[in-house]
Image (cartoon, helix red, strand yellow):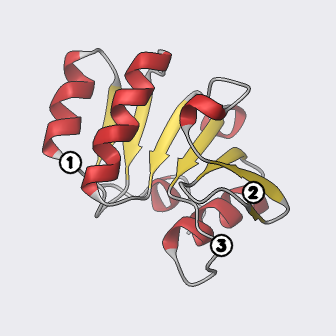
Amino acid sequence: MDEDKLIAVVGVSENPDKFGYKIFNDLLSAGFKAVAVGVRGGSVAGQTVYKSLKDLSSKPDIVLTVVPPVGTDKTVDDAIELGIKEVWMQPGSVSETALKKAKAAGVKVTDRRCFMAAHGVW
């Protein structure tokens, strides 16, 4: 079950109107184990926002991208380097380059599907 896996949400924002904030906050509220990654750092929902996947103390099982496609490219590069084996690209964050690169590296990719809807959170 994905509820037992550590999920890194990349693109977390301090702005409650942004999807990065809503997704991270709602995952926590639904009982998922999640860590926040956002280029600005800071904190959201009482949790530290790390500036990069490379800054996390534990390797996540799943990376969930909530960033523009160019950010997904960088995120997938980092995920491959760290040996992360699963990436969900939220609608709007899909990069064809990242998709091809991840699949070529043996990373399980789910794209154009909302993680939240697929797991009954929304």
> How far is disc 3 from disc 2 in space, using C-alphas?
15 Å
74 or 35: nearer the eye? 74
- What is the crowding at mark 2: few (fewer than 14 residues within 10 Å), some, or many (at least 20)? some
Instruction: Determine which quarter of the picture holds residue 30.
Output: bottom right
- Helix, strand or loop at disc 3? loop
Which numbered circle lies on residue 95?
1
Instruction: Determine which quarter of the picture holds residue 96.
Output: top left
Residue carrying label 2: 28
Which numbered circle lies on residue 117?
none
The C terminus sits in image quarter = bottom right
Marked residue nearer the N-terminal end (3 or 1)? 3
**Three-letter amino acid code at the position of disc 2:** Leu
- Helix, strand or loop at disc 1? loop
> How far is disc 3 from disc 1 in space, using C-alphas?
24 Å
Marked residue nearer the N-terminal end (3 or 2)? 3
Which numbered circle lies on residue 14?
3
> How far is disc 1 from disc 2 in space, using C-alphas?
26 Å
**Three-letter amino acid code at the position of disc 3:** Glu
